[in-house]
Image (cartoon, rainbow, N blue to C red):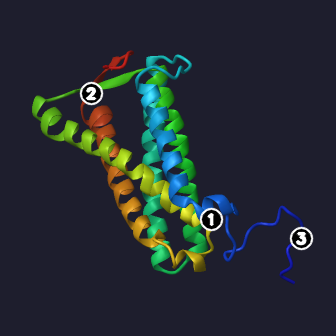
Amino acid sequence: MNRRHGMDAAPTIDERLLDSPRIRDHTLAATGVLTLFAYGVVLGTFTGVIPYPAIGESTVDLLGTVIAVLNATILVLLGYGWYSIRRGRIARHRTVMLTSVVLILVFLLLYLEKVGGGGIKEFVGPAWVKTYVYFPFLGIHELLSMLAVPVVIYAALLGLTRTPAELYRTRHRRVGQIAVSAWMLSLAMGVTTFLLLNVVYGWTYTSSLPF
């Protein structure tokens, strides 16, 4: 029998993962609210408005490595999620993309603590690498990270509040393609800058924010 037993039964592929009529009916507005909240938290961190527990240089270095591993893992998951949906494996796509969203939230928490409670690493290497490789990669990585926030949130909310059949009547596929493309490129550049900073060349530590 396929009858569900109790409130804790797992949702099937034909059910919504988040059964919230308010978010489902106002997905764009919910995206705007969550985007502004995310931008506000990041801005509050960089301006020192939001306090964080103080951490030392060694912890900042450790968090940087953990964050890079998370980014690489998310990059692989996004590629696998895209592959899965191209093969029509909807349930697997759902699971992989939801895992990616959870991991990016973990990344954000670690990153904010690293910056707000610790400091930053400054690139030490050849001037031409710093000017023409490291800074452009870092700048594009940060820009894409900011621009990806609303499209990732919108695609995620569409996927969470609708069944696969309902998603075909939305912009989930188109927005999802944009979100994944921007997100994967940002992650790839983030991992590259980490390798340049920590493996190929070197860094100096600054315990206070540069502005």
Residue 174 lies, in percent from the top left, at: 40, 70
| Apparent side of residue 160 relative to residue 171 in the rendered image (left or right) | right
Residue with the most extreme bottom position: 1
Considering only order in the chain, which callout, 1 or 3, is on the residue closer to the N terminus? 3
Residue that carries the numbered disc 1 in the rendered image: 161
Give amino acid for label 1: Thr
Q: Quadrant of the C terminus?
A: top left
Q: Mark 2 to mark 1: distance in Å?
A: 45 Å
The type of residue carrying mark 2 is Gly
Q: Nearer the viewer, mark 2 or mark 1?
A: 1
Of all residues, the one furthest to the left in this rendering is: 128
Residue hosting label 2? 202
Along the line of sight, which residue is nearer the eye, 37 or 135? 37
Q: Residue at x 82, y 66 (%)?
A: 9
Apparent side of residue 130 relative to residue 160 in the rendered image (left or right): left
Q: Count all numbered tags in the image, as a single digit.
A: 3
Residue for badge 3 = 5
